Image (cartoon, grey):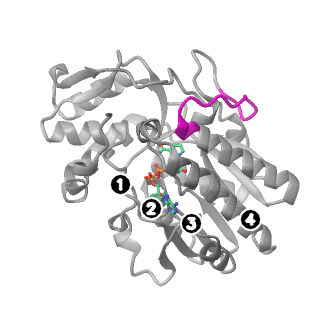
Amino acid sequence: MSRFLVTGGAGFIGSNFIRHLLAKDPDCFVINLDKLTYAGNLANLESVSQNPRYQFVRGDVCDTSLVRRLMGQVDWVVHFASETHVDRSIDSAEDFIETNIRGTQVLLDAAREQCHIHRFIHFSTDEVYGSTVSGEFSETSRFNPSSPYAASKAAGDLLVQAYVKTHRTPAIILRGCNNFGPYQYPEKVIPLFITNLIENKKIPVYGNGENSREWMYVEETCRAILFVCDKGQIGQVYNVGSGDEIRNIDLARKLLSLLKKDETSIAFVKDRLGHDWRYKLNSNKLRNLGFEVSGKFDVHLRETVDWYLAQKSWWGSLKKDVYTIK
Ligand SMILES: NC(=O)c1ccc[n+]([C@@H]2O[C@H](COP(=O)([O-])OP(=O)(O)OC[C@H]3O[C@@H](n4cnc5c(N)ncnc54)[C@H](O)[C@@H]3O)[C@@H](O)[C@H]2O)c1
């Protein structure tokens, strides 16, 4: 039986990944270590909470003795736990440094003490590369983070690289593009726009809306992670992108159309400080390993809208804590 420690499993990608893993690997056991910050929500995992192959532990990835104890019980690690909201990091970077850097170091050291750890999957982000006007970032592109969030993720990513070289930690790094789908906290752009439109509120578009992002459906990301668990090489980095690139304003228009609203629902707001213009990954390395993305962005966007339409009981109470720029 494979025994997994998933960190940050009560968040958006982590909870989708745990459901995916339990469904796809009938022999696995999953420990979910999550601090339950504002972004962590056990309701995301209600459907598996009684599963005998699943255990939740409330705790901090910076808690050395707890992490050591849990690490002794598993052979796989999938590390998602992070502070993740760029706007919050602009306001205050402290929690980002603590969790995204020190938390990663605590996990790496605990894994180092346990020679039975088979793989340590570290989930990093395209934001470590910063912004590009044209072209794509490959895994060897230089780091050029713009926000404190991205800088803290870059530091965590570099620590993993260093532990691979120095301690032969059996780690693999994945750098994901922007994800969307069910159970995403409604301060992130797609669920914020959808839920605002459902509530007949305006949707805030930064600057002129021409910044663009690459978007991947979260289920596709979960598939990619499991694929890499099976086929990825220790010490390697893989970009995990869909190829679906869209300008923010065009994304807003698609959502307006899906929710039968017009452009009067758009409010252009002052641009984010240090707002990256464009992210785009070259994910050929993962494709060459045999992973294929579904390429169904519009279908997945519609499914996501339908999910939020049906799940007001999930997001309604969360919206009061949504971060607004000071
Ligand atoms: N969402 C995206 O579009 C995206 C894209 C690329 C990479 N990533 C990365 O994927 C990972 C997951 O992102 P997400 O969007 O699911 O995040 P999220 O904010 O939805 O969830 C983060 C989870 O981590 C937990 N957490 C925070 N600090 C913790 C700590 N100190 N100890 C234990 N748990 C803690 C929170 O309670 C929450 O459950 C992050 O590492 C993020 O950087 C996300």
Q: Is residue 20 left or right of residue 126?
A: left
Q: Which residue is mark 2?
A: 15
Along the viewing direction, whichever of 260 and 269 lies nearer the viewer = 269
Residue farthest toward the bottom in the current orientation of the protein: 52
Q: Please tell me whether residue 262 is drawn above or below residue 314 in the rendered image.
A: above
Q: What is the CA distance from the residue labelled 1 to the residue labelled 2?
A: 8 Å
**Which is closer to the viewer, label 1 or label 4?**
4
Tell me if residue 148 is in the magenta stretch: yes
Which disc is residue 183 wearing? Answer: 1
Q: What is the CA distance from the residue labelled 2 to the residue labelled 3?
A: 9 Å
Along the viewing direction, whichever of 250 and 56 lies nearer the viewer = 56
Identify the amino acid type marked 3. Answer: Val
Which disc is residue 6 wearing? Answer: 3
Q: What is the CA distance from the residue labelled 4 to the residue labelled 3?
A: 16 Å
The first of marks 4 and 2 along the sequence is 2
Which disc is residue 109 wearing? Answer: 4
Mark 2: is the Cβ under 8 angstroms from ligand 1? yes
At mark 4, the secondary structure is: helix
Q: Give the residue drawn at x 35%, y 50%.
A: 185
